[in-house]
Image (cartoon, rainbow, N blue to C red):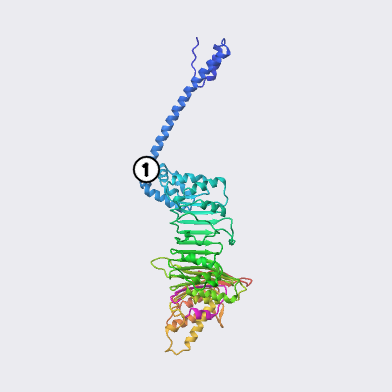
Amino acid sequence: MWYIKTGAHDLLIFRILAGLVLQDFNDTTLMTVTTQLTASHEDGTLKAIRAIDHQLSQLDHSARTLRSRRNALAPISTLPPEILSMVFMYMEAASNHSLAWIKVSHVCQHWRAVALDSPRLWTNIVLSRPKWTREMLKRSKMAPLDIKADLSFLTPRLLEVVRLIMEQIHRTRSLNITANHSTLNSIFAGLHDAPLLRSLNLRDSQRHGLLPTDSPSVPFAMKAPRLRHLELLQCNVEWNSPFLRPLTHFKLCDATPPPMGDLLSALQAMPYLEVLELQNSLPRPDLGLGKREVRLGKLKKISIKDPLPSCASLLGFLAFKPCTSFHLDCTFSDEPPASFFSYLKVLHQLPLKSINTLELAQDGPAYIEVYASEPASGGSPRATSFDFRLSWSQDVPVAPTEVFSSITKSLKLSLLQTLYHHRTQDSESSFWLDNFSKLPKLQNVTLSGSVVPSFLDALVHDQSHKASEPAGRRSLARIGFPSLRSLALHNANLADTVGDKRLLTTLRDVIGCRLQQGIPIIDLTFEWCANVHEADVKSLGMLVKNVRWDGQESVLNSDGEGLLFMDLA
């Protein structure tokens, strides 16, 4: 009898030897014996492998446990889960609806556990990522949801997610949907109660520009008692809907203009309204309404972007509280030119009484901008209470200076302290004398471009007029620009002339004359001005306490067609 010891690597040799020893057996017997031996060997091998794998798993578990214990000793791990979850929420808010913040759940087991146990982390749901929606709904538990969905291209998979998300309308806090009109109708037709909904933003993705007059409105059958913020872009609204009553913020863009009477009735039925924004949605003036006043007692801001006649018509019916800020962007083209300034008269009724900063700007022959700011209070930044952008057809024979004069006369500038004026076209000295020379508190004037000569010409005319009066009758209060102390010139060419004198010479004479009268210019600034030199700055320094110059000195280039600036500082 042969005694054969086989190992794990001798299976092939074993089979050969078995064939030699059992050569008298038939093939069936040999196959049976070989199979039994092979199965016995494989069972033993698998058991050994499993045992090794089990040991490796235990080692991995031990290593993870040690790493967790080591991480627990880090200072960040001493934060309570409530504080750590607040840090995560700040990261989520800063990500602006991006899922980049989710990496915090991949740092360690502790962080992942804290993140998964913080429902508020998973409440900002963007339906552009359908695969995440189900999981985020699950992780958010019953926390209020903020949902944003762009359904411009609605796929079956996305439609399924929309149905899923609309089932959570009872705990939805804000809803922002972009879709075509039929999709919007189907979504809201089946909704009934949204008790937590505070903000609703809808946009019709099929529409571009103004809606046709027969465009249907979005039906709001659901009850949303806490709704405060409503934005409709390229969507019509039912103006008699009770949906509007609790609003504090209402924005309507590119909608079918309603009758003026319906719009006024709707505004009157919104007693809590604080912010009103209307863009390409106002009707034309309705002369048949007669005198009517709608008081908006809580309104803080009104923003309108529409033709000037429509804007002026609406403002004429509204009564505002003094702290309301106005942001108006108007055009004028198809009305008779004679009515242009009649529409601007509506600005006289706006409650703007505490303006201390005014900026006038012109960009092109038929486009102006006016910004007026109120004084800062309580350490808060200066608030813009009035900004007005107006463009008109070049067929309308109106000069920008006339428009500026009409607007400034309506702004009640008795408290004005700072004036900025940037223009591409020059104005007359009468513009300054009529509108600004008598303001008692105007201290700082900043001028840019071609308006510098007319301003200095106004100072010259003012000085010559006062010099003709007897010395005993002249007083500080009657001198033009009595509080002017700071003058800044930007992009001015000091080689220009005022009368028969160079602008720089006129500036020096005016400053000297004011110094003699006891109303000196204390601060003088030159920035990117042509034809000003270091010697000029030094001579002016003898008359002005603080002269600031950026060191830019200009010379004519080789072909004489422009100016080159050299930094001499």
Is 265 rendered above or below residue 53?
A: below
In this rendering, is residue 557 above or below 44? below
The image position of residue 546, as x and y in percent, is 44, 74
Count of numbered marks: 1
Residue 370: x %, y % from top left: 51, 71
* Crowd rating for badge 1 (residues with CA inside 10 Å; few <14, some 14–19, many 20+): few
Q: Position of residue 499 (x, y in %)?
A: 56, 83
- Asked whether the viewer can see residue 227, the reply is yes
Q: Where is residue 562 in the image (x, y as percent from the top left)?
A: 61, 71
Q: Which of 272 and 551 is in front in this view?
A: 272
Q: Which residue occupies the foreground of this view, 567 or 356?
A: 356
Residue type at the position of mark 1: Ala
Dot 1: element: helix
* Residue placed most toward the observer, 155 or 244: 244
Instruction: Give the magenta-colored segment's residue range.
Output: 413-437
Taking the spot 56% from the left edge, 58% from the top edge, the residue there is 216
The residue at which mark 1 appears reads as 72
Q: Nearer the viewer, residue 473 or 155?
A: 155
Q: Does the magenta stretch include residue 177?
A: no
Q: Can the viewer see residue 504 in this picture?
A: no
